[in-house]
Amino acid sequence: MTSDEALYEQLLGGDMKAFDALYERQRACTDAFIPALVEEALAEWKSDSTDAAIATTCDRMASSPMGATALATSDSCVAAPSCGAFVDCIIPLMRKQL
């Protein structure tokens, strides 16, 4: 099996088949990969959730073609009665922004 480092180097070198191997490896290592991914996301969230970062994101979203729709949807999500309901409401909106 090719090492993760070697796959990464192949990707950097333009070997697009390495993507298949990389994603297959991530799938094979799901029990280790997903927690590491979540840990990385939590670390990123620390900087992305500052007031300044939120303002930048809001400005970017407001000027996007879907800005008005996103704002209307997000207002209804913010009004959700629980964190679970909020998450269920906001995740589809966030996916559209990716």
Image (spheres, rainbow, N blue to C red):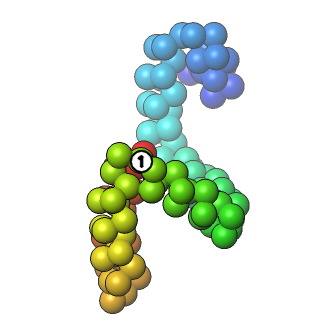
Q: Is residue 42 visible?
A: no
Q: Give whichever of 15, 33 is nearer the camera.
A: 15
From the image, which quarter does the C terminus lie in?
A: top left
What residue sits 61% from the left and 57% below the top? 56
Residue 5: x, y in percent? 68, 25
**Residue 35 in the image, given as x and y percentages of width and height:** 56, 57
State the count of labels: 1
Q: Residue at x 66, y 70 (%)?
A: 51
Is 77 situated left or right of 16 in this image?
Answer: left
- Quick one: SS at disc 1? loop
Q: Residues within 10 Å of mark 1 (few under 14, many from 20)?
A: few
Out of 85 and 17, give the one closest to the viewer: 85
The residue sitting at 52% across, 60% down in the picture is: 58
**Residue 1 x/y as whole percent:** 56, 21
Which residue occupies the extreme bottom position in the image? 81
Choose between 77 and 45: the one closer to the eye: 77
Q: Where does residue 37 sit, x and y in percent of width and height?
A: 57, 51
Q: Which residue is mark 1?
A: 64
Q: Quadrant of residue 39?
A: bottom right
**Residue at 51% across, 17% down:** 18
Q: Nearer the viewer, residue 24 or 47?
A: 47
Q: Is residue 55 visible?
A: yes
Relative to 18, is 71 on the left or the right?
A: left
Side of 53 relative to 1 (left or right): right
Q: Is residue 45 above or below residue 64?
A: below
Please, what is the three-letter code of the amino acid marked with disc 1?
Ser
Q: Quadrant of residue 75?
A: bottom left
Figure check: 9 above or below 31: above
